[in-house]
Image (tube, rainbow, N blue to C red):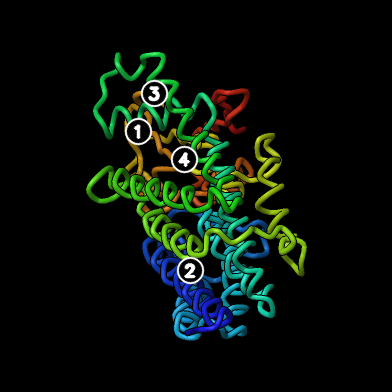
Amino acid sequence: MRSPKAILNEKTNWLIRLTCLFWIASKLICWKLWLADRLFPLIPPFDFLHLPANMHYVLFGFSLTTLVLLMISPKKRSLQIAVIVIEIISCLLDQNRWQPWEYQYIFTLFIFVANKKDEASIKPVLIFLLASIYFYSGLGKINPVFLQSIWYNLLLSKNFGVSYALAHNRWIYHAGYLLGLIEIILGLGLLFKRTRKIASILLISMHILILIVFGPFGLNYDRVIWPWNISMIGYLIILMKDSEEQFSFKSLELRWNPLIVVLFGVMPLLSLFGWWDYFLSSSLFSSRPTDMYMCVPINEKIPLYEYADEGKSPCDSTLGMINVRSWAFEELNAPGYPQRRVYVKMKEQLEKKYPGLNATYYIYSYKNGKKVKEILP
């Protein structure tokens, strides 16, 4: 019979391998996001971080290599630290790389590094991280724009073919708020031993449903979230074992664990007031992040015009409309980073690269329960 320490050690190994496997899968799906040879601009947080294209190739290669090596030797602390350092450097070269799953995986690995000498603390801290993600993901969905853009347009209408009249029935339309409310309740359920098992089972069911709806046999949309959803199922299955075990909040106070509490438990609250980034606040499919649309003259000689649709709102019939989010999905297989400061820098870069573009840039921000349009000067 194996000792509790041996069982804990095996569980830790599986969690690290799971993280690395689906991290690799996500990065391969959106491989162009990690390189510089693309039309979609790189937007580093500081201008001096514009580096030659070959440096991005090197970092991408190092990233994949160290992740594979860590899968082979999951307990090797030097590899764990190397992966974290490489990913942080890569993300500093382009804010579009600050994807929710990238952010989560970096700090998941950080939990293992910070609790190397006390593996018993890993499980409660990881459970807190997951509970926070579900809580804020659900909270972000409780807004009117989510009902229209995700609940009605994407799910009821496009996926399930529900008629306009039926979908806009008062009860059916507002039932969309239940998605966020249920996610909040299940996230909180992970924190308590009496509800952890049932919450895990229902959350696993939710991820399976997401894969069915957004997967290749459904909408075939946002492919980069497919491996993330599978990894979340894996986390829940592993952590569900011994679910009757008492959750120890004491572990959150030890070593560097308070950093997880601050970044995942406190800072996302600030995003509700626009003071913290949406993708760092588990704002997943909430319709709250900022969008940008470009109206460009019809000129097929401009390379990025291949991502334009003619005559679409907010542009008139003589212009092509580029939905920046759609452009990112088409070229990078991942969404761009939806913050106003990023879009402002993107406008500056495009105007510098294409002096004759003569485009108009529209920003749509979520304010007071609705989307507000702004034209960038």
User: Upstream in the sequence, badge 3 or badge 2?
Assistant: 2
**In whole angstroms, how far apart are the C-alphas of marks 4 and 2?**
22 Å
Q: Are marks 3 and 2 in contact (CB under 8 Å)?
A: no
Residue 19: which disc?
A: 2
Please tell me which residue lies in front, 50 or 29.
Answer: 29
User: Upstream in the sequence, badge 4 or badge 2?
Assistant: 2
Residue of label 4: 285
Of circles 3 and 2, the one toward us is 2
Residue of label 1: 154
User: Upstream in the sequence, badge 2 or badge 1?
Assistant: 2
Q: Are marks 4 and 2 in contact (CB under 8 Å)?
A: no
User: Upstream in the sequence, badge 1 or badge 3?
Assistant: 1
Which residue is at 42% across, 36% downward? 296
Residue of label 3: 316
Q: Position of residue 273 (x, y in %)?
A: 69, 34
**In whole angstroms, how far apart are the C-alphas of marks 2 and 1?**
29 Å
